[in-house]
Amino acid sequence: MTSAVLVDIRDEVTCPICLELLTEPMSLDCGHSFCQDCITGNSKQSEISQEGGSSCPVCRTSYQPGNLRPNRHLANIVERLREAVLGPEKQQKVILCTHHGEKLQLFCKEDGKIICWLCERSLEHRGHHTFLVEEVAQEYQEMFQESLKKLKKDQQEAEKLTAVVREKKACWKSQKEPERHRIQTQFNKLRSILDKEEQRELKKLEEEEKKGLSIIEEAEDELVQQSQLLRELISDLERRCQGSAMELLQVGE
């Protein structure tokens, strides 16, 4: 395909709004075509500004957002042009709606799902608050970063408490050892008459030691488990924050 022909074709399939090759081309009744994201954004902007209706960015002819229709012919032309210029291996992978076959580009906050423009107009999502995936992804990114910061702080506190408990455990054991030696020495001298008393005191001491150690070790185990859980949560959130917008938003599904 010659350069002149490519230029002519590119002019025909260029979005008047973003001036890039059409992506998911949508046509108006007036005949002009735009990227689905671009014309959807134009419609949403008209609703926000309360202009009373949407109009074609090229000829200003009024249109109803519900009358937008996919232009498969232009989509095929754009696909062929991209293959001719870039090669098929460089095409960006687009995730499509399993129900309508359209590009997933909107996020429904009520249902916590990524949907296409046809899903947005269906009974299931009608009247719901929908936003572009990129906008919501940024919001979720900030939310996850804040959660990540808190989890890291909680982990640090848990590790500090674990160290304190372990120190108390060692101190408890070291404090009991001299006392055990004193009792044994004393009762060895009076073994004949105090054997029973020695055994009773030792048993009492050992029970106290076991009880104290049991409480401390239980607290230690809980803190170790909490620390491990926090590390796993941190690892999961770090992985999601480093992933794509799609992976980030599919967490609630």
Image: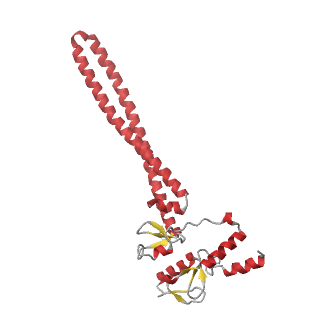
Q: How many marks?
A: 0
* Residue 194 placement (x, y as % from top left): 22, 13
* Residue 32 placement (x, y as % from top left): 60, 85
Going by the image, does 14 lie left or right of 161?
right
Q: Report which quarter residue 81 is drawn in.
A: bottom right
Residue at 35%, 27% in the rendered image = 175
- Mark yes or no: residue 20 visible: no
Residue at 65%, 72% in the rendered image = 79
Going by the image, does 93 lie left or right of 121?
right
Residue at 32%, 36% in the rendered image = 215
Front residue of 39 and 119: 119
* Quarter containing the C terminus: bottom left
Q: Report which quarter residue 88 is drawn in.
A: bottom right
183 over 60 or under it: above or below? above
Going by the image, does 48 lie left or right of 21?
left
Q: Report which quarter residue 111 is drawn in.
A: bottom left
Coloration of the structure image: secondary structure
* Residue 82 placement (x, y as % from top left): 68, 71
Front residue of 80 and 129: 80
* Residue 121 placement (x, y as % from top left): 45, 77
Q: Quick one: which residue is furthest to the top in this view?
A: 192
* Quarter containing the N terminus: bottom right
Going by the image, does 228 lie left or right of 246?
left
- Mark yes or no: residue 68 visible: yes
174 over 34 or under it: above or below? above
Residue at 53%, 89% in the rendered image = 62
